[in-house]
Amino acid sequence: MDEQGHSVSLVGPGLWNLKHKPGDPVNIVIGRQVGEGPETIVQVAQRPEGRPWDCTKRIQGRLKRNAKGFAFVNNVFVAPHIVESVGPNVADVAAWAIYAKHPTTGEFSWRAIKLSEA
């Protein structure tokens, strides 16, 4: 704890070099880190007793863009901010997808979380 009552993370701000692969069983602590956004992952710890999750998958295919900014790859939804991570002329892509709850409907579906040129 600092003088203002904020908890202090041992992980420095902006540290992104985690040694976990998508689907690895981990525990995640989400909190607020001073100087960053309202919700920040402040701790990721391996769960050796866990099994890899089947809620992630690697896909490859054609990026089908919509005029509204979102897209699909093999029926996997790609949010506009993820589509913007590749150039406007990129058509063949690879993506990591997660099976997650839709933010407004509450239904589960596949959503891309990372996109790159294939």
Image (cartoon, rainbow, N blue to C red):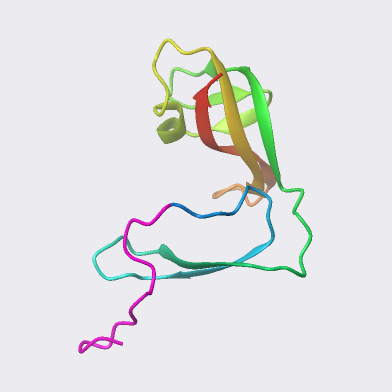
Q: Quadrant of the N terminus?
A: bottom left
Majority SS type along the magenta span: loop
Considering every residue shown, the one lying at the far left of the view is 3
Residue 7, horizontal then vertical, whole percent: 34, 82
**Residue 88 left/right relative to 102:** left
User: Which residue is nearer to you in this view: 19 or 60?
Assistant: 19
Residue pictured at 59% horizontal, 54% vertical = 20
User: Which residue is nearer to you in this view: 88 or 16?
Assistant: 16
Residue pictured at 52% horizontal, 36% vertical = 114
Q: How many marks?
A: 0
User: Which residue is nearer to you in this view: 82 or 7?
Assistant: 7
Q: Quadrant of the C terminus?
A: top right
8 falls in the magenta region: yes
**Residue 58 left/right relative to 4:** right
Query: Against 82, is 66 above or below?
Result: above
Residue 67, horizontal then vertical, whole percent: 44, 17
72 falls in the magenta region: no
**Residue 17 left/right relative to 78:** left
Residue pictured at 77% horizontal, 70% vertical = 49
Residue 73, horizontal then vertical, whole percent: 62, 23
Query: Against 94, is 48 above or below?
Result: below
Residue pictured at 72% horizontal, 68% vertical = 48
Residue 53, horizontal then vertical, whole percent: 75, 53
The residue range painted magenta reads 1-16
